[in-house]
């Protein structure tokens, strides 16, 4: 249905060449919106638009999740001088698809004495939280489901809800490994949430807005990591460290420390419910990486340098979507490098790092950034 | 004041050592030439196993179909799980003396743990490891091998 709409509208209203869509997706979405509003009642047009966006997000979720699992295995393999998956499809790209099909066919094992309602509910809470955050992320120019005026605040608030799903999974499994894993995960996420929030506040002070589209627009003359120089760089490092902890990935994977707790909070899950947790973990990584890309590296904004108009014009030729994906995957690569380089922290070292090092530095950093913005010492 | 300097020094040194570690892993990531994985069924023709690889126990024979095994049975005694069984016979040498010699050196590959105790303890170095590793067969009886070839004899000068 969608391609027909596009064909009708582009041919009828204004003939926009197809490659323009890559530079501004609102050229694609605007005519669809106008056509829907004109042909059905406002209620149904909203419902249809939401359904289209929902289906697109579902597809995106599956594709990105599977790709990230594959990418993780490949990155890990290259770091350890191995080849990684290389049997199914060229370079093994269909390996994770095959894994997913296998997981879909596997039995969902019911746990004796488990709280079955909460046990079944927990993976869906994690997944729903993921979708709610994805809705607020600007993927490209005009490719942005909801543009709240408190976008970044909404992202922090909603993403911290995923700990509820983790705790429910651990509690309802009726297993000591799951419970210990979930409790560790809770302690970890609650403490590192603070660092993430303060690192984001540093950038919000520099941008002067919480709206994600405005934050990106403010980086038209240079990305914030260059504009805010020292405090922005410190905030970036702190954000990367604490977001690694927030997503329960190594070296902070206390929650699922496989040598001590088998698999942490999802020990008792099997089949597709396990796959939900597994995918949600990787989408969480994608979300924190894309927020880092948006706040520090300019989101979909091409690499611009102040008033070098010729240079900026050349950079604009690369579509914003490519910039966004490139930056996000660069940060994902850094996070993966963390996991396969550093040994796991003990729980006390983890909390020491947060409360004795990251938090004081972060508070000082916010102060420095506020002072710099006040004096106008940024670029 | 000293404690603050110590605190900052700790942070800088910590970051420095973390960056060192990341340098090592990212060097490996960006140098695909160092990958050691072999694509086994594809490179089967050109595959060369390492010299020290313990594939299976063999008894090397020279071109005159002679081996070094005297049939002493030390390998059988040393084998921890009864993989080796020696069946000996009595032969009459050229000068008319009776002498113990090997009849069958039975080696059960299915029970072998490749611990190399037999190869190490053999007094006349009659046993060795080959690099063959494709041992799968359809019948378990094929895993019981007789190491000395039919009609083979003790090498001259080995006692």
Image (spheres, coloured by chain):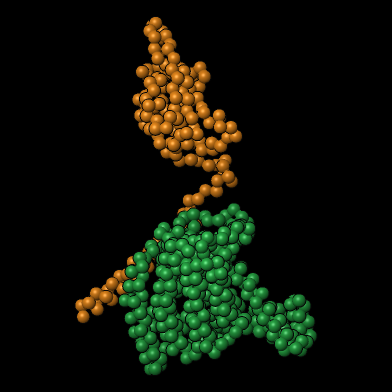
Chain colours: A green, B orange
Rendered view: A278 above or below A300: above
Image-based side of A165 in relation to A356, left or right = right
Q: Which residue appears at 34% of the width and 84% of the height?
A: A364
Identity of the residue drawn at 51% across and 17% down: B151
Question: Which residue is at 74% across, 80% downward?
Answer: A6
Q: Is residue B116 above or below residue A283?
A: above
Q: Is residue A271 above or below residue A145?
A: above
Where, quadrant-wise, is the C terminus of chain A in this rendering?
bottom left
What residue occupies the far top of the structure in this picture?
B96
Q: Position of residue A276 (x, y in %)?
A: 57, 67
Location of residue A236 by image quarter: bottom left
- B35 sits left or right of A355 in the view: right
Tell which of A317 and A21 is nearer to you: A21
Nearest to the observer: residue A20 or residue A138 = A138
Quarter of the figure with residue A1: bottom right
Residue A30 as seen in the image, left or right of residue A354 = right
Q: Percent x, y for residue A352?
A: 32, 73
**Is residue A272 in view?**
yes
Rendered location of residue B7, percent (x, y): 27, 75
């Amino acid at each position: 249905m969608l391609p027909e709409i596009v064909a009708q509208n582009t041919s009828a209203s204004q003939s926009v060449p197809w490659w323009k869509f890559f530079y501004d997706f609102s050229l694609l979405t605007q005519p669809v919106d106008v056509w829907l509003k004109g042909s059905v009642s406002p209620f149904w047009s909203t419902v249809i638009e939401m359904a289209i966006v929902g289906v697109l997000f579902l597809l995106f979720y599956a594709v990105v999740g599977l790709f990230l699992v594959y990418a993780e295995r490949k990155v890990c393999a290259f770091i350890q001088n191995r080849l990684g998956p290389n049997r199914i499809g060229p370079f093994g790209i269909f390996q994770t698809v095959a894994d997913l099909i296998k997981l879909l066919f596997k039995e969902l094992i019911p746990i004796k004495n488990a709280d079955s309602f909460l046990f079944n509910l927990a993976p869906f809470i994690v997944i729903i939280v993921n979708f709610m955050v994805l809705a607020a992320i600007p993927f490209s120019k005009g490719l942005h489901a909801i543009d709240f005026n408190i976008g970044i605040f909404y992202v922090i608030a909603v993403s911290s809800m995923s700990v509820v799903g983790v705790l429910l999974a651990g509690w309802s499994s009726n297993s000591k490994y799951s419970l210990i894993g979930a409790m560790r995960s809770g302690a970890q996420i609650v403490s590192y949430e603070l660092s993430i929030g303060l690192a984001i506040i540093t950038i919000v002070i520099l941008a002067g807005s919480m709206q994600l589209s405005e934050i990106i627009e403010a980086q038209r003359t240079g990305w914030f990591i260059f504009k805010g120089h020292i405090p922005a760089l410190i905030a970036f490092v702190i954000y990367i460290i604490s977001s690694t902890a927030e997503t329960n990935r190594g070296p902070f994977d206390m929650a699922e420390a496989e040598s001590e707790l088998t698999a942490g909070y999802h020990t008792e899950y099997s089949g597709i419910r396990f796959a939900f947790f597994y995918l949600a973990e990787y989408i969480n990584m994608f979300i924190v990486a894309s927020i880092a890309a948006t706040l520090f590296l300019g989101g979909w904004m091409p690499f611009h340098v102040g008033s070098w108009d010729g240079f900026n014009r050349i950079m604009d030729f690369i579509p914003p979507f490519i910039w966004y994906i490139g930056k996000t995957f660069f940060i994902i690569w850094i996070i993966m490098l963390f996991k396969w380089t550093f040994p796991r922290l003990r729980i006390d070292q983890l909390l020491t790092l947060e409360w004795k090092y990251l938090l004081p530095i972060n508070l000082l950093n916010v102060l420095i950034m506020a002072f710099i913005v006040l004096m106008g010492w940024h670029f | 004041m000293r404690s603050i300097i110590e605190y900052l020094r700790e942070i800088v040194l910590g970051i420095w050592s973390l960056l060192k570690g990341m340098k090592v892993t990212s060097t490996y990531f960006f140098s695909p030439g160092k990958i050691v994985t072999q694509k086994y069924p594809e490179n089967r023709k050109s595959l060369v196993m390492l010299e020290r690889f313990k594939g299976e126990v063999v008894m090397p024979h020279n071109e005159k179909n002679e081996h070094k095994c005297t049939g002493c049975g030390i390998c059988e005694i040393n084998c921890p799980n009864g993989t080796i069984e020696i069946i000996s016979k009595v032969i009459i040498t050229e000068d008319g003396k009776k002498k113990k010699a090997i009849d069958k050196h039975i080696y059960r590959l299915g029970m072998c743990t490749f611990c190399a105790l037999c190869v190490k303890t053999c007094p006349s170095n009659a046993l060795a490891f080959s690099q063959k590793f494709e041992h799968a067969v359809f019948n378990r009886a094929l895993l019981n091998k007789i190491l000395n070839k039919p009609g083979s004899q003790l090498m001259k000068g080995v006692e």
